[in-house]
Image (cartoon, rainbow, N blue to C red):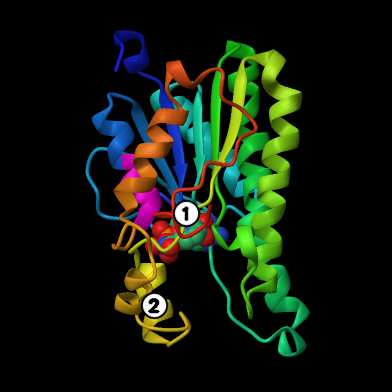
Amino acid sequence: MSPESTTARTAVVTGGTSGIGRAVARRLLADGHRVATVDLSPGDDEGAYAVTADVRDRAQVDKAMDAVRDRLGPVSILVNAAGVDGFKRFADLSFEAWLRVVDVNLHGVFHCIQSALPDMTTAGWGRIVNISSSSTHSGQPFMTHYVAAKSAVNGLTKSLALELGPAGVTVNAVPPGFVDTPMLRRAEERQLLGGTIEEHIARTPVRRVGRPEDIAAACAFLVSEEAGYITGQILGVNGGRNT
Ligand code: NAD
């Protein structure tokens, strides 16, 4: 990395106390950034400043961002990793269940970006990375609500990148595919993956399951100085499962 890519910034990682978000928080800490996690659970990691908040609730998000500003300074980097999955045949899907999944995965991204954005536009520098899902490449049966919300996140990413480019803020999305996290293990336990993890590995070109650190590496690059000419992009990290 070039020296300028290690400029210390204040980074917020939502969903930062489990799985992918946790790996992103650790990686950004290792890269020298000041890191806060915003999650329903405080987690047990040392190093990051843990703020407990529900990303669906704007008042809680605003309060969380204020706490981060007070402790670590204005927010320059936002990685939206908080998310929930959902599996239900569409015909049986209640509107409440639909709303819950859309609320966390899409509206949570809306709230967190809007809440952190003034810091970035004031500074004339910002990096936003939204964790969507590889299911948006091809669709996924029984996950209409989830895929709809994650596809909307990709669309928001592209449109917002056009709005914020002149302000010095980049906006990109990373749709992960098949990453070994508590979310994936819970789905496997409930036999919702359409096969075991081992069977999926056999169908994955790089012949392994994704690691949270694989996603963290992509995020670390996208939030770096040297990624400043990359915006509005959807960078798949999926072992070649989706091309
Ligand atoms: P995870 O369940 O391990 O972690 C998700 C985190 O989000 C948890 O810490 C949880 O507390 C937090 N969270 C959930 N709802 C929240 C809310 N309302 N407010 C604040 N925090 C909330 O899951 P993961 O696999 O690490 O998933 C991270 C992201 O990656 C999610 O957006 C998920 O949809 C996406 N994703 C994961 C995979 C995969 O293979 N694991 C694949 C595609 C997309």
Decide if residue 188 is on the left or right side of residue 173.
Answer: left
Q: Residue at x 41, y 69 (%)?
A: 183
Left or right position of 155 against 184: right
Q: Say which residue label 2 marks.
A: 186
Crowding at mark 1 (Cα within 10 Å: few <14, some 14-19, many 20+): many
Q: Give the residue at x 58% y 63%.
A: 135
Ligand 1 neighbours mark 1 (CB distance < 8 Å): yes
Q: Secondary structure at mark 2?
A: helix
Main secondary-structure element of the magenta-colored stretch:
helix
- Residue 140 is situated, as x and y percent measured from the top left of the image, at 61, 72
Q: Is residue 147 above or below residue 37?
A: below
Residue range corresponding to the magenta coloring: 17-25
Asked whether, in this view, residue 61 is left or right of residue 47, the answer is right
Q: Residue at x 59, y 41 (%)?
A: 234
Q: Along the polypeptide, which appears first: circle 1 or circle 2?
A: 1
Residue in front for this viewpoint, 139 or 5: 139
Question: Residue visible at 49% across and 50% down?
Answer: 81
* Residue type, mark 2 in image: Arg
Residue 74 percent location from the top left of the image = 50, 21
Comparing labels 1 and 2, the label whose residue is closer to the camera: 1
- The answer to whether residue 137 shows anywhere in this view is yes
Where is residue 153? Give x, y as percent.
67, 49
The residue at which mark 1 appears reads as 176
How many angstroms separate mark 1 from mark 2 (CA)? 17 Å
Where disc 1 sits, the SS reads loop
Towards the viewer: 64 or 55: 55
Work out which residue is located at the far bottom of the displayed protein and give it. Answer: 92
Disc count in the image? 2
Is residue 165 positioned above or below 173 on the image?
above
